[in-house]
Image (spheres, coloured by chain):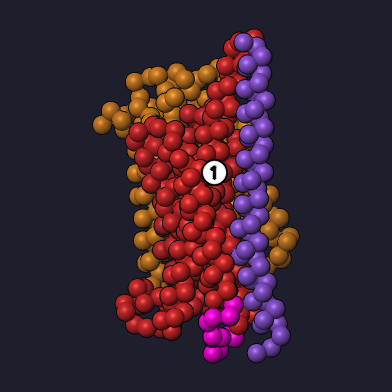
Amino acid sequence: MRTKLILALGAVAGPLLLRNLYVIMFGVPDEMEQGPIYRIFYYHLPAFLTAAACYFGALVASVLYLAKKDQKYDAFAVSATETGLAFAAVNLITGMIWGRIIWGIWWAWDPRLTWALICWLVYFGYLMLRTAIDDPTERAKNSAVLSVFASASVAVTWKAIEWWRTQHPGPVLSIRTGGVQKIDPMMENMIYMNTLALLLLAAIFVLVRLRQEEVQREIDGLRRYAHAMN
Amino acid sequence: MTTLRHAAAIARKDLRSEFRTKESINSTLSFSVVILLLFSFAFDPSPDMIVEFGGGLLWMVFAFAGALIVNRSFARELPNDCIDVLVSSPASGASLFLGKAVAAFVLLFGIECICLPVFGIFYNITWWRSLGGLMGVLALGTWALACAGTFFSALTMNLRLRELMLPMLLYPMLIPALLSAMMLTNTLLTGQPIPSDFTVWLRILIGFNIMFTTLSLYLAETILVR
Amino acid sequence: MDERNITFMFYGLAVAWGLLAVYAVLLGLRERNLTKQLDTLKRMVEEKK
């Protein structure tokens, strides 16, 4: 069942990703001021949105774990966090490459960049914490609590560094600007299409990772069983 | 009410045992002074420069010192399984956490009060020009360090590489609190009145404290009881 | 537009695809490793029975 779902998602996501890549390369026109480099944006923003969705999913799963103490929520939390980190890395590095051309520097201590980096570090700490605890219940409990704290801290950090001067371009999507059309509708549609593609890809990653967590638990169970038989 | 009474008992116990051995106080204090000294060698700052980054320097030192102190807060209870006794005592997880956080706060605040004059002497600046405000910011920032630090100390208590894991988890999460405290301290060190748009930093610092204290009190029981 | 603009666009797209591909490969490797472990364990338990 799970495998079929993964394959089905793959069958949709794969062609969509390729089609998007084709359109991004040859279909959309160059941006007037930035030239071809702006095409990175079609991965930069969708990757961020996907990562944010993953982090949010991890928070929900962690809260559910604390309420219900069911291992499957813990498995979902770690899968979503890890996938989120992968997409956040895409977001950060594509942003750096864009910044090198447009700003002339790889990195600016701009609020959004700083925030994205802090986010990455905080959630990386979450994965580190997991590797340091052996007992599954203890690990699930402690990391769920850490995930809740991480989300709280990340939210405050967002507010805190918003008060620095900003260098990063402001929102362009019409849902964020209150209906004002800041970019060509064709470009905006392309962003949504690629967000969809990346979200599907993220769903596949999470599902695969989730199955691995289950296999891991089965292995641990068998180990204990084999041990007890000796 | 019982929670507070229990918390006070735990805090008294922690402070008493600390003052008997003085192991964290001595090591943390000397560590802080050494860092202050090293910074002075590294940057050889002029008085104008110090006014610009003094707050940052102070809070870096305090953050290092804080990690050292809170590292001991729960690790202290590990030998002889003291932690199991504390958890099974009538004191709730929240009061246990609160007591330890208060003890860490008192220790850290004391160390900061010693560091400030040392800082003033080494870097040749008059730091007491707005003493009241400075103490207020110090107290708020220290509570953020002590509260989040004590909670993470409980979280990492049984870990391999505990000493490494704690700062790695703690510092990124403390960034909003440390950032606000640095900004406010920087302004207070100059002795100028705080510009009106700086109240936002104060709000962030207070908001951070309220949020982390509530979350910690709420989740302490989950973490401590196994 | 200058040369570098286009080159860096390719770098950017390559990084976006590359990172995700690397993550997918890592997932695949972990999958293989886990399956192997599971098989070994299952065989061990069978033999003991």
The answer to whether any part of residue B79 appears in the image is yes
Does residue B100 appear to the left or right of B168 in the view shown? Answer: left
The chain letter under disc 1 is A
The type of residue carrying mark 1 is: Arg
Does C39 sit above or below residue A143? above
Structural crowding at the residue carrying mark 1, measured as other residues with C-alpha within 10 Å and reported as few (<14), some (14–19) or many (≥20)? many
From the image, state the color of chain C. Answer: purple
Give the residue drawn at x 35%, y 24%: B91
What shade has chain B been given?
A: orange
Q: Quadrant of the C terminus of chain A?
A: top right
B65 left or right of B218? right
Q: Residue at x 50, y 48 (%)?
A: A6
Residue wearing tag 1: A209
Please say whether residue A118 is visible from this viewpoint: no
Is A70 magenta? The answer is no
Instruction: Give the magenta-colored segment's residue range.
Output: A25-35
Q: Which chain is red?
A: A
**What is the secondary structure assignment of the residue under circle 1?**
helix
Q: Is residue C49 above or below residue A51?
A: above
- Residue B159 sits in which quadrant? top right
Q: Position of residue A176 (x, y in %)?
A: 36, 73
Where residue A166 sits in the image (x, y, percent)?
A: 49, 75
Quick check: is A31 in the magenta stretch? yes
Give the image location of residue B153, x and y in percent: 52, 37
Going by the image, does B70 lie left or right of B26? left
